[in-house]
Image (spheres, grey):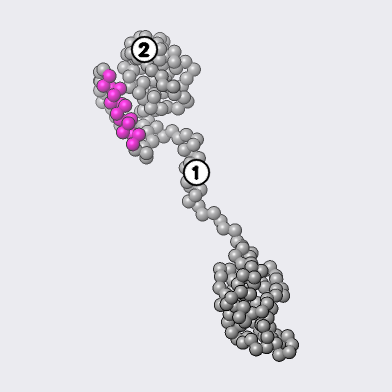
Amino acid sequence: MAVTFADLHTESGLKALDAFLSGKSYISGSQLTKDDVKVYASVSGKPSADLYPNASKWYEAVSTKLASSFPGKAVGVSIGGQAAVSAVEEKEDAADDDDDLDLFGDETEEEKKAAEAREAAKVPAKKKESGKSSVLMDIKPWDDETDMKKLEESVRSVDMPGLLWGASKLVAVGYGIKKLQIMLTIVDDLVSVDTMIEEVLTVEPHNEYIQSCDIVAFNKI
């Protein structure tokens, strides 16, 4: 809820301000805010420490903060009437439009956390290294009339991330039929051998040459 202070240039106004600041460091909390600057601009000078101890202590704290934020040497000016407050408010409104201006260097916990999150996002997360496996497969043709050269070409034409075909040889099965025995290396997170057999090698167009596939050996590298 907004707090209203009136006639801060008078004894009654300063008395009200002093009472309000009892037990407080600043107008709106534990840190200096624009509310303090507005009230500060409306007070003509440092209140008497004897008459207004709370207001005097607050005024000194704000003065110290402002002095550290504006290190230039002031020559002193006098501004009368309400214009002083209006000028401060206009300057503060302009400051609101400048997101990069931090007048007093104060930073809330939320701002700190947001800054830390932004910095963390800039650091690429270390990618977990995926395991690899070495697989030996038997690939069988339909019959002894199947062109084994084209069968092997069909097998090796299967290309997918994480798959590397290796050495191969033809092994006699019987009755003039030979099977293709082939090595392959896979990245475990990228290639499923069972899925490749069911959804690629034993369906069109590869099933023109391939009758079935069997996993003979499967070893982690």
Please name the residue shown 50% across and 52% down the image.
Answer: 123
Between 100 and 200, the one nearer to me in the picture: 200
Q: Is residue 124 left or right of residue 90?
A: right
Residue at image mark 1: 116
Give the SS element for disc 1: helix
Please say whether residue 125 is visible from this viewpoint: yes
Please say whether residue 49 is visible from this viewpoint: no
Name the N-terminal-most of marks 2 and 1.
Answer: 2
Image: magenta residue range: 82-97
Give the SS element for disc 2: helix
89 up-or-down from 205: above or below:
above
Q: Amino acid at mark 2?
A: Gly
Most common secondary structure along the magenta stretch: helix
**Label 1, residues with CA under 10 Å away: few <14, some 14-19, many ≥20:** few
Q: Quadrant of residue 163?
A: bottom right
* x and y percentages locating residue 75 in the rendered image: 26, 26
How many badges with numbers are in the image? Answer: 2
- Label of residue 13 in the image: 2
Q: Quadrant of residue 158?
A: bottom right
Between 90 and 173, the one nearer to me in the picture: 173
**Label 2, residues with CA under 10 Å away: few <14, some 14-19, many ≥20:** some
88 magenta-colored: yes
Please name the residue shown 64% across and 72% down the image.
Answer: 197
200 magenta-colored: no
- Label of residue 193 in the image: none
Please name the residue shown 43% across and 33% down the image.
Answer: 106
Q: Is residue 200 left or right of residue 32?
A: right
Q: For the C terminus, which image quadrant?
A: bottom right
Between 141 and 44, the one nearer to me in the picture: 141
| Cα distance between the residues tagged 2 and 1 | 44 Å
